[in-house]
Image (cartoon, grey):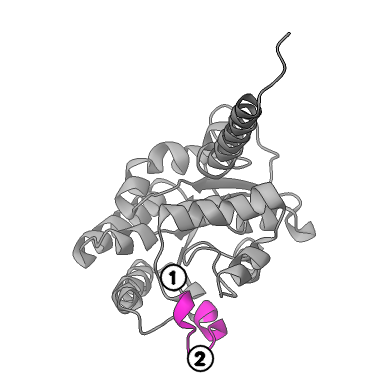
């Protein structure tokens, strides 16, 4: 048998390194972008038996899905006071208000919910969806839920994007939050002031490194820190110069706890 040459050893090390890197990349990609949350609608609402307690559906995008960033729906599920409740996570990565409207029947109404929390619009802001279009979609979502069943519905305002309130993106986001508040008032449903509570926690003046500059690379790097190296979402956020967001959009443990507490208070007063 011929001995390994230095070149062969280098090639072997390179091959092993590449295999490990590809494996790690695939693991992070699956855990972050492909894996379904616990009690997603296909599992919870299509032929599955419920516990008989109140059914709560959280409907939205990746911030609700809670796989990249804090899982506030999962945190509610673990609370003792909601032990008899069934929490359905109807968050889908990248969804806009139009996307949620398209899947409302299968992912929300088929669950026969007693309460629905809607947190959607961040991707509308990012995609520069017209405010009138966003208003129409949100109105249709609320109208469909309230017409078909007897569920209590709450609209949650959108948290800032990054921690600079004067950033152009956050100035645009303010218009979408006005639409949310107006839609809730017009429909006679509840409004949960998530943006207002998160904004109170933003440091002033804003750290320039915490301005909104979201991208796939930033999100993937945040997920890698969490899933490969076991860092908490707060630790991931701090590595980016932020207290509240792991990648300028998705929630740290600290900001996720705000969502959990606001929602818990609403549920406690609504489903008495």
Mark 1 secondary-structure assignment: loop
Image quarter hosting the N terminus:
top right
> Residue 157 bears which disc, if any?
1
Give the answer, above or below, for where 33 lies relative to 200.
above
Please provide percent x and percent y for residue 200: 54, 85
The residue to which callout 2 is attached is 204
- Residue 140 % position (x, y): 29, 54
In the image shown, does 219 or 71 lie closer to the viewer?
A: 219
x and y percent of residue 79 in the render? 75, 58
Q: Is residue 72 above or below residue 181?
A: above
Is residue 202 within the magenta segment?
A: yes
Q: Which residue is depicted at the point 30% across and 50% down?
A: 98
Highlighted range, magenta:
197-210
- Give the quarter of the image for residue 88: top right
The 10 Å Cα crowd at callout 1, few under 14, some 14 to 19, many 20 or more, is many
Viewer can see residue 136: yes
Let me know if residue 268 appears in the view. Answer: no
Mark 1–mark 2 Cα distance, whole angstroms, equals: 21 Å
Give the class, few, some or many, for how many residues have Cα within 10 Å of label 2's Cα (few <14, many ≥20): few
The answer to if 146 sits in the magenta stretch is no
- Residue at x 65% of width, y 71% of height: 254
**Picture disc at residue 19:** none
Kindly indicate the quadrant of the structure image that contains residue 270. bottom right
Q: Please tell me whether residue 24 is drawn above or below residue 219 in the rendered image.
A: above
Left or right of residue 231: residue 148: left
Residue nearer the viewer, 93 or 44: 93
Q: Secondary structure at mark 2?
A: loop
Residue that lies at the very extreme toward the right in this rendered image: 80
Image quadrant where residue 208 sits: bottom left
């Amino acid at each position: 048998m011929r001995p390994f040459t230095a070149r062969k050893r280098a090639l072997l090390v390179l091959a092993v390194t590449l295999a490990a890197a590809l494996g790690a990349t695939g693991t992070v990609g699956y855990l972050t972008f492909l894996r379904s949350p616990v009690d997603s609608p296909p599992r919870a609402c299509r032929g599955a038996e419920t516990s008989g307690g109140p059914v709560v559906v959280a409907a939205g995008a990746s911030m609700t899905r809670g796989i990249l960033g804090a899982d506030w729906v999962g945190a509610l599920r673990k609370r003792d006071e909601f032990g008899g409740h069934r929490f359905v996570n109807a968050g889908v990565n990248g969804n806009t208000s139009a996307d949620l409207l398209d899947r409302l029947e299968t992912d929300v109404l088929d669950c026969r919910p007693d309460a629905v929390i809607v947190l959607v619009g961040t991707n509308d802001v990012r995609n520069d969806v017209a405010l009138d279009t966003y208003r129409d979609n949100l109105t249709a979502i609320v109208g469909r839920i309230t017409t078909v069943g007897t569920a209590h519905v709450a609209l949650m305002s959108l948290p800032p994007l990054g921690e600079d309130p004067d950033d152009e993106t956050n100035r645009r986001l303010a218009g979408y939050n006005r639409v949310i508040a107006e839609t809730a008032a017009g429909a006679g449903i509840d409004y949960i002031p998530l943006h207002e509570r998160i904004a109170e926690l933003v440091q002033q003046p804003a750290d320039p490194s915490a301005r909104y500059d979201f991208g796939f690379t930033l999100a993937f790097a945040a997920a890698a820190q969490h899933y490969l190296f076991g860092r908490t979402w707060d630790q991931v956020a701090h590595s980016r110069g932020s207290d509240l967001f792991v990648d300028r959009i998705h929630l740290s443990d600290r900001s996720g706890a705000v969502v959990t507490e606001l929602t818990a208070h609403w549920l406690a007063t609504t489903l008495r």
